Structures are given as C-alpha cells and as structure tokens.
Amino acid sequence: MATYIIKRIFSFLVSLIMVTIIIFSMMHSIPGGPFDEEKMPLSPAAKEKILKMYGLDKPFYVQYLKYMWNVLHLNFGKSYQSPGEEMVDLIKRTLRVSAFLGGLGLAWAIPIGLLLGIISAIKPNSFVDYLCTALASYTISVPVYVSSIFMVFIFSLGLHWFPTGGFGGPKTWVMPIIAYGLFPSGILARYTRSSMLEILNEPYILTAKSKGLPMWRVITHHAFRNALIPILTIMLPMFTGIMTGSIFVEKIFRIPGLGGYFVTSIYKRDYPLEMTLMLFIIVSLALTYLAIDIFYTIIDPRVRLWGKGR
Amino acid sequence: MSKIKKSILISLIGVILVVGVTAFGFASGKLLPPDAASDQILYYPLKFESGTYMDYMKTIYNCLQGGADLAQEPLMAFNKDLEVVPLGAESWEVSKDGLTWTFHLIKELRWSDGEPLTAHDYVFALHRCVEQGYDFGWYWSFAAGIKNWNKVEKGELPSEELGIKALDDYTLAITTDAPKPYLLGVLIWLYPVPQHAVEKYGDEYATRAETMVCSGPFKVTEWVKGGYLTFVQNPYYNGLWKPYLQKIILKYGTFEPETGFPAYLNGETYRSDVNPGQLAYARKNLPDQLYSWPMFRVFYLSFDTTKPPFDNLKVRQAFNHALNREELCSTVLEDLASPEYSILVKGFPGYDPTEPKKLSEYDIELARKLLAEAGYPDGKGFPKLELWIRAEDQLMAWQTPAATYMQAHFKEALGVDIIPRVIEVKTFTDALNKHTHNFFLLAYQFDYVDPSNFMDLFLTGGRHAWSNPEYDGLVREADSSEDWEKRIENYRKAEKILVQEAPAVFAFQQLYSAVWKPYLKGEGIEPDKKGIASWGDMWGKYVMTHIYIAKH
Amino acid sequence: MNVKTLSIGGVDDKLQTWRCFHKNKLGLIGLGVIFMFIFAAIFAPLITPAGYAEQKYLHEINNFPSRSHWFGVDAVGRDYFSRVIYGIRVSLFVGFTTAFIALFIGVPLGALAGYFKGAVDWGVMRLVEIFSVIPPLLVAILFVTLFGSGLQNIIFILALVSWMDICRLIRGEILTLKEREYSIAAKAIGAKPYRILFRHLLPNAVAPIIVGLVLCVPNAIMLEAMLSFLGIGVNPPTPSWGQMISNGLYYIQFYWHLTLFPAIFLALTVLSLSFIGDGLRDAMDPKLRERR
C-alpha cells in the first residue's frame, strides 16, 4: 500500500510541475504585460519601472522558481486585477459564490440526470426513452449561453419573476442554478443510460429477475451499483468544474465568481492569479481521481489498487 | 442692555441660527427642484471587469472609472458644452513666456476625511506617476509637456525638478517645456491624490471602501467586488458642483449593453448604452428614452509606411479613394456613424468640412489607376493583407461590420485580399507600438478639447509608423501659438499633408446611443448649446452632479 | 485455425451491427439528417442564392425572413440562408478534421500504453493527465493569443483537447484484448510486438475507435461554438455557426433570425452525430448484441 501511495503522489507531482511549467511559459510568451498602452506607447523608463514593480524584469526561470518557492510557503502573491486583497481572500470570496451556485446546480442535475438515464435504460427505444433523450439532448446541443439569454428574456424581462442578474437574494440564484445544471444533467443522463443498458443485459440481471425480484430492487441492488463506476468517472470531475464556474453563466448573469477570472487573467496578463487557479484545479482534480479510484475498490471488490490481483 | 437692544440681539441671533442651519443643511447638497422624488437614489451601470484602483492617477486604463468619476475631482473639468470649468482653482495667471501657469486653489476644499486639499496633493500625484511608472505618462510628457518629465522619469533629474510645484499650500505652479495655450483643457486629467492616505495605507488605499479618501462630491461607503458600489454625498465637499443625488449605486456588469440593456429594461439600472442590434428595439419601443449624439472618436485604417506595400504613396492613396464612406455609414453601420475624411471630426474645434472631403473623394477609377501605377494592376501581385482589429467590447459593434464591409469592398474595387482578424487587446497594442504589423483598424477618442489632441497623434515617434518633418513643424508651430486663427491655419495645412500623404485612411465618426429613464431630469442631461442631449462619460462628472430623480 | 475468423470484423458481424443499429430509431434519424446536411454542403452553390461572403444586399440589412431571403439578411448584407448552408461545410470540416487528428494522436499513444504497460503506460497516462487537467478554454485562449486564430489553429487546438478520451478508450480496449487467446497464441508462436499490435489487436479495437470518433465530432463543433462566443474562432468571412450565434445574440431582442437559424442547425448537427454515435456504440457492443 505504501508503494502505491508514494507512486500516486510522485505521479501527481510530475503532472503538477509539467502543467505549471507549460502554463507559465505560455503566459509569459504572450506579448504584452500587466500594463496598458492603448492610446500611446509607454515610455521605456515607465515600462521598466512597472515591470520591476511586478518582478517581471527577471529571467523566466527565476520568476518560475520564485513563484513555486513562494507557493511551497503558501504565499500565492496578489492578483494584478485586485491588488487590495490577498490571493487567498480573492479565491475565498469568489469560490464561495461559484461553489454555492454550482453546487446547487449539481444538486438538481445529478438526481435528474441519473433518473432520466435509468428510466430510458429500462425501456430502451420506447417513447419514454426518446423523451428523456430529447431533454438530455437539448442541454448538450444548445450552448449554455444561448439558454441563459433565453432564460433572461423569458423569466426576467417577460414574466418578471427574477432580476436579470447580479448576486444577491434567492431570486438571483434561480436562473444561474438552472444554467449551471443543464449540461451536467444531460451528460449524466446519456452516460447513465448507456452504462445501465450494458449492465441490464448481463446474465445475472436476468437471473435476479427470474428469481422474482421487483424491477426497482433489481436496479438499486444490482444494476445501479455496477453501473456506478463509469458514471462516477464522469460525475466527480464535475465538482471541480463547478467550482471553477463558467465564464458564460457568470457574464450573462453578472455573478462575481471564479470562472470569469480564468479568462480575464489571460487578457490582463494576471500571472499570479492564473497560476494559482491552475494549481487549484490540478489539486482538486487529483483528489477527485483519487476519490474515484477509492470508490472503485469499494464498489467492485475485484479491483485492487495495490497488492496481488489484476 | 435696554429691552429694544435685547430683542434686536435675540432676533439677530435667531436669524443667524436659521440661516446657519439652513446653510449647513444644504452644505453638502443642493436645494431640490419641486418635482423631485423623496428618494434620490440612482442605479448606474459599471463595467464587468471594473478595475483595480479608484484612482485615476494610479492607472488610467485599469482604473475603476465609474467610481473614480464620482470620488475624485480634477483641477479642471468639462461641462456638457465642452467648456472648461475650473473646479479646483479660483484664479490663475500665465507667465509672459507662456510656460508657467500659477493656479490659486480654492481654500475651502476638503477630503472626505476632513483633511484640507492642498497644492501638495497635486504635486504628490504627478511625482508618484513619474516615479512609479504611469500608463497615462505619455499624456503628461507629450500632450501637456510638463517640464523635465522625461528626464525625471529616466532618473536623470530628481523629482523636485518636475514642472509642477507647490509654491505654498494653496498655490500651484505648472511649467511646460513649450507654450501650451490650451493647457487648461489638458488639466482635466490632473487629479489630487491624498498624500496622507497613501502614506498610511499605500496605493491600496484606493481599493477598499474603508480606506478610500475622496475629494469629489460623492464618497464610497460600500464596495462589494463583482457586485456593486454605493456612493453617498461627501459631507466635506465644498466645491462648485454640489449634487442633487443622495446616493448612487453602481452595479457591476451592467455597462456592456448585452447585459446592461436587459437590466435597464427591468428597472435595475436607470441608464444603459445601446448597441446597434438593440437600437432597432429601442427606436420602436422606447423612442422617448433613446438619445444619440456624435462621439469625438474617429475610426481609421492605419498603415505601416516604412515597409512594402504601404511604403508606396500611390497604394495608400488608392485605398483612400477606393473607400465608399457614405455607403459604409448608411448601410452596414446603419447611420450610427458619419463619414470622416480627416482626423478632426465633426463638432470638434478645427474641423474642416470641405477640403479633406475633396482630397479623399470616393473615386474608383482613380483608385484603380493609382494602384496600377504603383505596380499592382487590378490587385495582381498585391500581398494578402490581414486587417487587425482590437478586441474592445464597446467598439466591436462598429469595427466588425466595418471590417467585413471593407474586405468585400476592397476586393471588388481594387482586387486585393484582406482578412479581418480580431486580436486581443494587449497583443494588438504591442504590435501597433512595436510596428510589427502593417495594417490596423483603429479608433481614437479625444482626451481634451483642442485640435492638438488629435493632430499630435501623427507626430514622429508616436504609435504610427509614419514620419513627415513638414507635418511635424506645422503641428508644433500650431500647438504653441496663442492666436487661434493662426493655429487653425497651420492645422489646416498639416491636415492637407495628412490626407494627401495618407498614412491612414480616415473612415467614420461614431454616433453614440444610450437610453435613460424619463424621470431623470436636470441641466446635466438637457440639450446643450447645439441642441443635443447627451450623457458622455467625458463630461460624466458634470452630468452626475446636475441631475435629479423626478417623482414617478 | 485461422486467427482471423475468431475475431470480430467478418461480414456476418457487420450485418449484425447494422441490424442492431437499425433498431435505434434516433440513430437512423440522425444518420438521415447528417446525410441531408452533407448533401446540402456538397451542392451548396446550387441551392443557395448567393455566396457566403457576398455583401449584395446592403440595403436590406438585417431583414427578416422573406420569400427572396429564406433566412433573412445578416448585419453586413449577406443572404443568411447561404451563410447557414455553407456553415455546414465549416462545421463538419472542423468536427471531422479535429476527430481525425485526435485519432492520429490518441490511437497510437493509447495502443502503446495498453500494450507495453509499465513505464510507457505511466508516461502516456501522465500526458493524458496533463492535457485533461488544463481547462480547454484556457488552452484555447492562450494558444490563440500566441498563434492567432483561424481555421487551422482552431482545429489544432480542438484536437489537442480531444485526443485524451480516444487514447483512454484504446488503452482500455488493448489492455483487455491483450489477454485474449489469439494474441497470446500469436505471441507464443513468436510474433513481434508491433505485428501483434497492428495485425491483431488494433483491428479488433475498431469498434471503440469508430464510436470515439463519431462522438468526438459533436464535441469539437460545440467547443468551437463556445470559443466563438469568447471572440476566438474562425476568421470572417468564413461562416461558422458558433460565430453567427454569438454575433446574433447581440441583436436577439429584435433580429431574432440571426441567432435562431444557426442555433437550430447547430443543435441538429450535434444531436444527429451524438445519436449516430450512441447507436453505433449500442450496436457494436457485444454484450448488448447477445440480448437482441
């Protein structure tokens, strides 16, 4: 077991370092920097001063090593886009919003997606199947920004049920939560359907049914458990995705979340924030994959991550 | 004391008390008009990526512009007729050589924490700019021409040698390196910075509501990043423009019309920009809330005249004559733009309505002839061009259709292939300034009201790859003379060179459209001397302090 | 015994696959729609009144659908029906080219990882992890800022973020097939690894390859639509539905036709391809087949 954990951590570190190097290099290769010269060029003296202030006058590898060294001491620097607060505070306040809305979005998307998938798997190629597939299909074939804008026009401007955006009371939560959950629910429904279809055709299901077990019991006790592995592989990474928010939903509903910062930090050359966000994602996903693998062992006793066996 | 004297004394004290209380009661605000609502709260849009510091003297492009307009007050400002109003000074003199301006500041001005606003605050502002590196630095070294700016910036001279000095607490002396008769207009971008706050909190004083210190008519009480800002009347404001409004709430993300217009329709903000797509809707459904006014912003094609193919004058002139500006404006730009043939736009001082148009006449035959003479008959052999457009959200609605139109149009007229490409801001600017690309579609908006603002753009050493000593001489001569007629004469001569040499093809001037609620009233948004009602952000301070909310 | 007849891929098998696919009505409809679109794309010049870049109708800008302009006119005077139909070419081209490039990257890597295991597997999985972790939008924006936008660059970026799924699929399939009798037999008689890989294993892995391919196409098309909203995508005047939709959104309150038509076509294309993919997967899965 110890070798397994060490191997895991080692692999994770390798990936982490590679990703940070790639992103760091790409960010610094783009022309421009955290200064603006939209109307007239900056004088060389002024540019030099600004770059020095940000520590960008040093050679590339020095900057990288310095950044990673600071990270080891949990010092992430300050975002150029929000110099008045520490990086940690910035992440905390935006993450709170993204995770909140995104989490609630998943809270409705997961049950609905699973349900739609299971139902359509039980009666494949039937009318119910087509209905569920149609609903799931809408969510994956219409871009989320189109759905969001339609929601604003229908529910906000048309019916006056909700404000057009912003983040405040519960009324401002409804539409973003729906928007966040659309795509996950659709994807989940599709994967659940195909996964369940496979399982439901296994011999042991036939056995269970011929024993006289009611259908719902067959599903919950036998089928679903075994279909869970591929479903979880799709589902768990969604949590990381939801925390990073969606630039589209945030822009249209004017939500002060984390997703917007991903895009703006590139355009504003906000190197510290971009790197911090990347680190955040890598760590989050690494933990997610670990969780998935642990789930594997719990669900399927044949799978062993370490020791003897396949 | 006798009884009569006592009663006179008492009544005198009474009168003084009443007057005093009334005066104090209105010290921070103005007397409201009779039709004003009881709640004077304005909900106003703010950009989605609203920036970092609420301090124009720290960074111009990254500043929280909407907020800084309310919280900070410059030395001079525009009113809606684009007249310069002295907000910080009560009088001034110019030295005989025209180089030194001495301002006598209004003594009663205070910061929002009670501290007096002195000349030292202005000096500190520019010193900080030149020492730290300021993205609007070119404005002070180039447009204003503050003495010794470049040398101090490079470190060759100490900051004390900079052309801004506080002769005493309320006397400010500004020295330029050449006579600038239009300096007052330039000074609309000179803001004082609270030295005492910076010394206590550093530059980050302007990033939080708790530490922010304001000199303007409003002060910030709440700053929820990504959400909204709340401004209330600044109780220590003793300046000229006391506001009617009691509270202003700026909402993030409602400035861009794509998200801002729905918010406006829903009553969440009281004003919104309108993009061309929404214009049709507004014309149909909200005609009395829709206002349009010409913007002093010119869009033009910029060439790199130092490398082929645009080093050839005939090529540039061919493009100039091949562009059908009238058609471009009336069709693709849906009359939200008016044709321009030179750099000074309609309504701007120095505008010439006749000559440039004659020189840049739309004439396809001539254009084709010129291109053939340059060695590219019917566009054969002409290299494929990429027309770079800067990805500025506000301008895309004009730039993209214009570029697409030009692509088809130049292909038909001259046989040249152009691919429009949208390039993100910093990459674009970098290429422009370093002259690494040869064909751009650009816009320039005015910074102050004087022809020099635009004419100086094409002086040697600027952002454009073109140099013409004759042009330089004429413009510099015009910049420094006192006599308006003489200046215009020189500017006209320079313009002629500009149009004939065609380092740029000037295409159109933008027409700006916005909607605001009918219950917003006041001199701020009433029609100006030309009869146009507008709410431009260059005179936004004037508007915000001269409007009120009527009963509705 | 002929090794080949034991493997999946014979004529009987293909017929069986078609029969199963046939039962999936959605898959059939999807196939029909795609064929119709391909037909329209090929014969676009014949069925459209104008080219996609011809700004002939400058005085009818933003006109609503009418008899002369079935889908109306766009903001620079081009016939919108023409733009949407030519857009089929662009979308299908983007989708399929991306999928093929992803295939070229993913299949060899996956096969090598699955067959050789050990360090090779570890290395490939690290690559997969690195590429999976970086959000596609981020990569796209960084890439475009560095190298510019345009059809080729966009396709390259889309392939870079799509190859991982195919790689994992192939790796899993090869891992399983490796333990089958015929490959052990082949190894026993002394066949070299690459021969085993290419002559025996990969042909049997065709099913997941095809499924992965077909499912990659709609993803690529949707991703391009997302990138267009952010302003990075193909260059004008190339008609891309994603760009048409995001440009049209600005006008949606009034000129609804600018968003509606490309959005419908986008949805139909993505859905049809997804249904075809699902149908193929159901049809080719041996476990599912045994039941039918």
Image: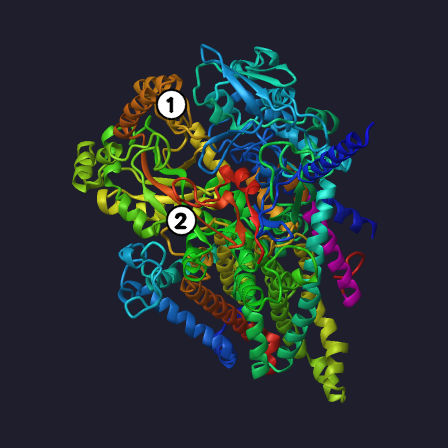
Q: Is residue B475 left or right of residue C116?
A: left
Query: Of the numbered discs in the image, which one, if any, rests on residue C235?
Result: 2
- Mark 2 vs mark 1: same chain? no
Residue B455 x %, y %:
37, 27
Question: Could you tell me how many numbered marks the image carries?
Answer: 2
Query: Looking at the rendering, which quadrant does residue B131 occupy?
Result: top right
Colour mapping used in the image: rainbow
Residue C25 x %, y %:
50, 80
Camera-side residue: B285 or A213?
A: B285
Above or below, comparing residue A122 to residue B105 in the picture: below
The three-letter code of the residue at mark 2 reads Asn
Q: Quadrant of the N terminus of chain B?
A: top right
Q: Secondary structure at mark 2?
A: loop
Q: CA distance from mark 2 to mark 1?
A: 33 Å
Camera-side residue: B217 or C65?
A: B217
Above or below, comparing residue B92 to residue C163 in the picture: above
**Chain identifier of the residue bearing label 2 in the image:** C
Label 1 CA crowd tier, 10 Å (few <14, some 14–19, many 20+): many
Q: Would you say residue A11 is visible in this rendering?
A: no
Residue A155 x %, y %:
58, 67
Above or below, comparing residue B255 to residue A218 in the picture: above
